[in-house]
Image (spheres, rainbow, N blue to C red):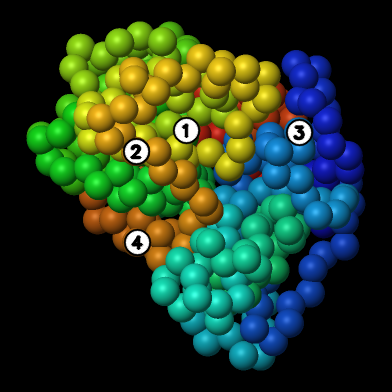
């Protein structure tokens, strides 16, 4: 089968080619797995975090990718939930132990044995992917394959982030960074909370303009001051500078939710300018998002179909994965990026 593989870690520079197209053995399925012929796989900033070593794979070479949509072409003998030719999706959560206190309390995202698709196990930048049936998701008929792929991570983790804010209708929400997850959160909020005002902070002028097109009430750069204090802010950026700006824009008692698997070191020195009075005082809260649960993915797929929420997408051929990742690193984004593996 065709696959894009990562063989060594390093900086994703403007001319880097970290992934290589190779012929790779087709996976086989165990009794509780299904085999997907992959049609599309979303491109996520987490792949950049893997390449650059902020969330490194435990072994190399690796096939990355964790927003996978395909059709079932083989079934293990114990599989009951899926049939041949049915569409299925695979998200970041590849597996969890199922027995620890976190798993038993519905927080499998915190499981010490959490395994990630495309990091701890081969992912969807390939023609085929094997997955345990209990970690695969039916795809609602409303979505095309390419539309469904970003929902499996950008949408699901955005949905989890939104729930963690505790946002209530009538409040003011900030979105720091406006990529795949941010634009889906904005669309979700417009449906769930019609009286919430949305304020977007983004480095790119095109991202700010895109947010206004989708219904944001205001957009500015990370260092700008919003016209009102914000009750909740979701940060989806890979750097530290926007965190300080977000805390300064937060209202007393407000909550900042950081939706990032890692932060780049390049501007970490900015944390030395953290000022208790202006950034943290008045019972402001900071909460991080760690991974997703299967329920996050399933619930968001259902919600998005019911509300007819679709992502804006840009498609690339599988062999153009490096180009898509470089553009993502350089913030050349409008919605979500998706690799087309098969038609």
Secondary structure under tag 4 reads: helix
Looking at the picture, how far across and down is residue 132, in whole percent?
Answer: 62, 75
**In the rendering, which numbered label is found on residue 236?**
1
Asked which secondary structure carries label 2, the reply is strand
Image spot of residue 137 (x, y percent): 48, 66
Q: Nearer the viewer, residue 55 or 130?
A: 55
Which residue occupies the foreground of this view, 186 or 304? 186
Q: CA distance from mark 2 to mark 1?
A: 16 Å
Q: Earlier in the sequence, mark 1 or mark 4?
A: 1
Viewer-closest of 89 and 248: 248
* Extreme residue toward the bottom, this view: 77
**C-alpha span from label 1 to label 3:** 18 Å
Q: Is residue 328 above or below residue 7?
A: above
Identify the residue under disc 3.
52
In three-dimensional space, the C-alpha distance between marks 2 and 3, rounded to whole angstroms, equals 29 Å
Q: Dot 2: few (<14), some (14–19), or many (≥20) neighbours within 10 Å? A: some
Q: Earlier in the sequence, mark 2 or mark 1?
A: 1
Q: Image point 41% across, 66% down: which residue?
A: 295
Which of the two discs, 1 and 3, labels the residue nearer the N terminus?
3
**C-alpha separation, residue under disc 1 versus residue under disc 4:** 21 Å
Q: Work out how far the residue at label 2 is from the one at label 4, CA to CA, in angstroms.
A: 26 Å
| Alpha carbons under labels 4 and 3: distance apart | 31 Å
Question: Where does residue 202 sit, x and y in percent of width and height?
Answer: 43, 17
Label 4: how many residues lie within 10 Å, few (<14), some (14-19) or many (20+)?
few
Q: Is residue 207 visible?
A: no
Residue with the mark numbered 4: 299
Residue of label 2: 285
């Amino acid at each position: 089968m065709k696959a894009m593989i990562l063989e060594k870690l390093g900086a994703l520079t403007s001319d880097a080619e970290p992934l290589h197209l190779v012929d790779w053995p087709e996976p086989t399925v165990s009794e509780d797995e299904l085999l997907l012929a992959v049609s599309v796989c979303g491109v996520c900033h987490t792949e950049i975090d893997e390449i650059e070593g902020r969330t490194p794979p435990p072994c190399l070479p690796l096939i990355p990718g964790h927003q996978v949509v395909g059709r079932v072409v083989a079934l293990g003998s114990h599989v009951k939930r899926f049939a041949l030719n049915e569409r299925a999706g695979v998200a970041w959560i590849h597996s969890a132990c199922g027995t620890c206190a976190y798993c038993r309390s519905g927080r499998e995202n915190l499981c010490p044995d959490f395994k990630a698709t495309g990091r701890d196990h081969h992912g969807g930048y390939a023609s085929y992917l094997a997955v345990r049936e209990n970690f695969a998701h039916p795809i609602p008929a409303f979505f095309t394959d390419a539309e469904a792929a970003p929902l499996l991570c950008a949408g699901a983790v955005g949905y989890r982030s939104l729930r963690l804010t505790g946002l209530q209708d009538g409040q003011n929400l900030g979105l720091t960074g406006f990529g795949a997850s941010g634009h889906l959160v904005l669309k979700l909020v417009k449906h769930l909370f019609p009286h919430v005002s949305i304020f977007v902070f983004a480095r790119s002028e095109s991202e700010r303009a895109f947010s206004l097109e989708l219904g944001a009430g205001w957009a500015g750069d990370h260092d700008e001051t919003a016209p009102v204090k914000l009750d909740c802010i979701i940060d989806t950026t890979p750097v530290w500078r926007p965190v300080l700006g977000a805390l300064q824009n937060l209202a007393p008692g407000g909550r900042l939710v950081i939706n990032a698997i890692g932060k780049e070191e390049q501007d970490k020195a900015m944390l030395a300018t953290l000022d208790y009075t202006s950034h943290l005082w008045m019972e402001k809260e900071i909460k991080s998002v760690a991974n997703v649960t299967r329920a996050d993915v399933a619930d968001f797929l259902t919600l998005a179909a019911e509300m007819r929420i679709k992502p804006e997408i840009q498609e690339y051929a599988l062999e153009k994965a490096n180009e898509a990742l470089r553009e993502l690193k350089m913030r050349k984004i409008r919605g979500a990026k998706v690799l087309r593996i098969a038609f």
